[in-house]
Image: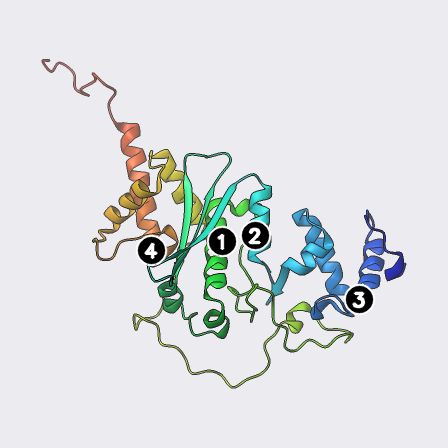
Amino acid sequence: MTLATLPAERVVDSLPERQEYAKALSVSNLLPKQYQGQPGNVLYAVEFGQSLGISTMAAILGVHIIEGRASASSGLISALVRRAGHRLRVWVERDSAGSLVAAVATIVRKDDPDFEFRATWTMGRAQAAGLAGKQVWKNYPEAMLKARAISEVAREACEEELSGVGYTPEELGAEVNGDGSIVVTTARPNTPGRSIREAVAPQQQQPEAPVEPVTGHVAERMISDAQLKKMGTALREAGLTDRDSALAFVNAVLERDTDNPVTSRNELTLDEASRVIDALDQEAAAKVNQPADGDTGEQGEAA
């Protein structure tokens, strides 16, 4: 098999066939640098694409391996969400002068149309996370904010559709362009033995001066994906099916005042999330133990 004889539609059943296909495809100089001359990397994309139900080329262009962890472009994440039938909407908000204020992404699941998942990313959040100083954030703030909002809301709303690619390369520390594609600075075409991890590894540079956290304290561990799922389920079971009532309950549990409210569950720390989940569990237990209408719970009491 050669590149010229590759079929337009390919059905590959055996590992030797997949290996031969990857070897033939890897000679193309139109592939991203980390795949040129790297049939092993192409084979990885073939396998990963099959697990996601997407074509090999979609996997090559949209899936990136950062330090051994799979990531995806925000475009691929959006496609996976919409392919599953969920409604994803993304927009930016601007002030009266036309300056960028925030990027907002919402998802309404097809199996839960009455609840809206929402993620909002502002330059304030980016600054607090130490992102605003990156060159790509300075050059393409709107694209970066939208990508962060998309991946965040997708992880919260429908992580099961992402098959392990819920983070973008930029979120995992890769240097990217404005469209989210990786900037490969150390890859050399047709150099045998290079892995995807080596291809996207940053060049050796003098370490930058550490950026002090905004609060001056060591960053706390943030809410886990498992906690997000459990909290979302518990909120719906408690009848808190709209975003405002859910956030009102969270703020009440955490005793947040109006000057420092929680605006998204993704902002919670691990400890704060545990407190909210515990409160929801207590609410559920109280409902179970609540006497039925007309039952005072005591015998012989006069009406």
Q: CA distance from mark 1 to mark 3?
A: 32 Å
Tell me if residue 131 comes above or below residue 75 in the rendering.
below
Instruction: Name the residue tied to disc 3.
Output: 28
Tag 3–tag 4 contact (CB < 8 Å): no
Of all residues shown, which one is farthest toward the left?
Answer: 302
Q: Three-letter amino acid code at disc 4? A: Asp
**Amino acid residing under circle 2:** Ile
Badge number at residue 88:
none
Image position, residue 77 (x, y; %)? 57, 52
Q: Earlier in the sequence, mark 3 or mark 4?
A: 3
Q: Secondary structure at mark 2?
A: helix
Label disc, if present, on residue 150 of the rendered structure: 1
Q: Position of residue 300 (x, y in %)?
A: 13, 14
Indicate which label's residue lies in the foreground, 3 or 4. Answer: 3
Single out the mark in the foreground, 1 or 4: 1
Image side of residue 241 versus residue 46, left or right: left
Question: Dot 4: within a 10 Å radius of its alpha carbon, few (fewer than 14), some, or many (20 or more) residues?
Answer: few
Residue topped by disc 4 = 271
Q: Is residue 47 above or below residue 293?
A: below
Q: Could you tell me the amino acid type at mark 3?
A: Ser
For the question of whether residue 164 can be seen, the reply is: no
Question: Mark 2 sits on what residue?
Answer: 77
Q: Quadrant of residue 1?
A: bottom right
User: Helix, strand, or loop for circle 3?
Assistant: loop
Q: Residue at left 53%, top 40%?
A: 86
N-terminal of the pair, mark 4 or mark 2, is 2
Distance in Å between CA atoms under marks 1 and 4: 25 Å
Contact? badges 2 and 1 (CB < 8 Å) = yes
Q: Nearer the viewer, residue 133 or 129?
A: 133
Given contact means CB atoms under 8 Å apart, are the residues at marks 3 and 2 in contact?
no
Q: CA distance from mark 3 to mark 4?
A: 50 Å
Q: Residues within 10 Å of mark 2 (few under 14, many from 20)?
A: many
